[in-house]
Image (cartoon, rainbow, N blue to C red):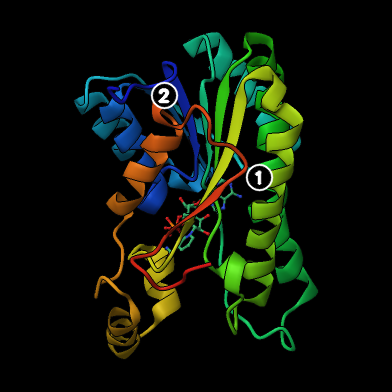
Amino acid sequence: MQIKPTGSVAVVTGASRGIGRAIAVGLAEFGYDVAILDLGAQRKALEETAAEIRAAGRKAFIHELDVTSKPEIETTVAAILSEAGSIDVLVNNAGILKPSTLEDLSEKDWDAHFDVNAKGVLLMCQAALPHMRSKKSGRIINIASIAGRQGVATQGHYAATKSTVITLTRVLAQEVGMDGITVNAICPGIILTEMGKNNLGSDEAVRHWETVASLKRLGYPEDIIGPVRFFASNQSDFVTGQSLNVCGGIYFH
Ligand SMILES: NC(=O)c1ccc[n+]([C@@H]2O[C@H](COP(=O)([O-])OP(=O)(O)OC[C@H]3O[C@@H](n4cnc5c(N)ncnc54)[C@H](O)[C@@H]3O)[C@@H](O)[C@H]2O)c1
């Protein structure tokens, strides 16, 4: 069976750089027009992502959006449906990580991580689901993290948000499957993006994790494209509620 897209329009949050940009361009190369969403401060970077999508021969729709804002999400989803005609794939990728021990963590940073990484996913799903339900199809792909499975020192708050995303993925899959919608998650390992590099901090840490990884290297944003395409394709028609580790063999559960 040939791998094929399941529709024509994908939406990717946090698409200005890193994993989100790779996913947006990877879905364009797979055949999707892509609505790319990110904070207003990322406008210039969003335009670079859009140029790569257009170079792949697909349409790009740019929207400035904060995933913590329900009104902004509702306006943006309505605008995408009007300009692109459909939302077939939703990739919830926007996320933040500011390391801290749990003892030192401020209430403000706890709330900020839950607002972006967990509530943002929920609000985007809630906004896209009425359309997906009405057309009896849709693919939701949430970018979680292996941190959400294992828990990592200095990332307790971040890991808790990602555990929430894994649980939300399982539950939502059960609640929307009857309308032909699948919900799956990807748990990246250490990916060399701005977030990944800041988190590692030193060349020594990079070398340490390269040694730990079964594949003896860390990940690149492009390593996430294939798994996203799988969940956005006909090849995963019977897969839902699952979370797939994409980590080069750092974590196994
Ligand atoms: N890099 C890694 O090692 C790694 C590992 C596991 C999981 N992840 C997850 O992958 C996703 C992408 O991470 P990345 O490494 O590309 O990070 P990144 O920091 O390079 O990119 C994150 C993007 O999200 C956007 N964003 C942040 N807050 C937002 C908000 N409120 N509204 C809209 N957009 C917002 C940022 O502007 C940025 O474009 C995140 O969910 C992250 O938690 C990353």
Mark 1 lies on a secondary structure that is helix
> Which of the 4 image quarters holds residue 177?
top right
Q: Residue at x 26, y 31 (%)?
A: 51
Name the foreground residue: 155 vs 37.
Answer: 155
Q: Name the residue under label 2.
A: 234
Q: Position of residue 8 (x, y in %)?
A: 41, 16
Q: In which quarter of the image is the N terminus?
A: top left
Name the foreground residue: 207 vs 227.
Answer: 227
Q: Quadrant of the C terminus?
A: bottom right
Q: Position of residue 47 (x, y in %)?
A: 34, 35
Mark 2 lies on a secondary structure that is helix
Q: Name the residue under label 1.
A: 169
Q: Which amino acid does label 2 sit on?
A: Asn
Question: Which mark sits nearer the N-terminus, 2 or 1?
Answer: 1
Residue 71 visible in the snapshot: no
Name the foreground residue: 205 vs 54.
Answer: 205
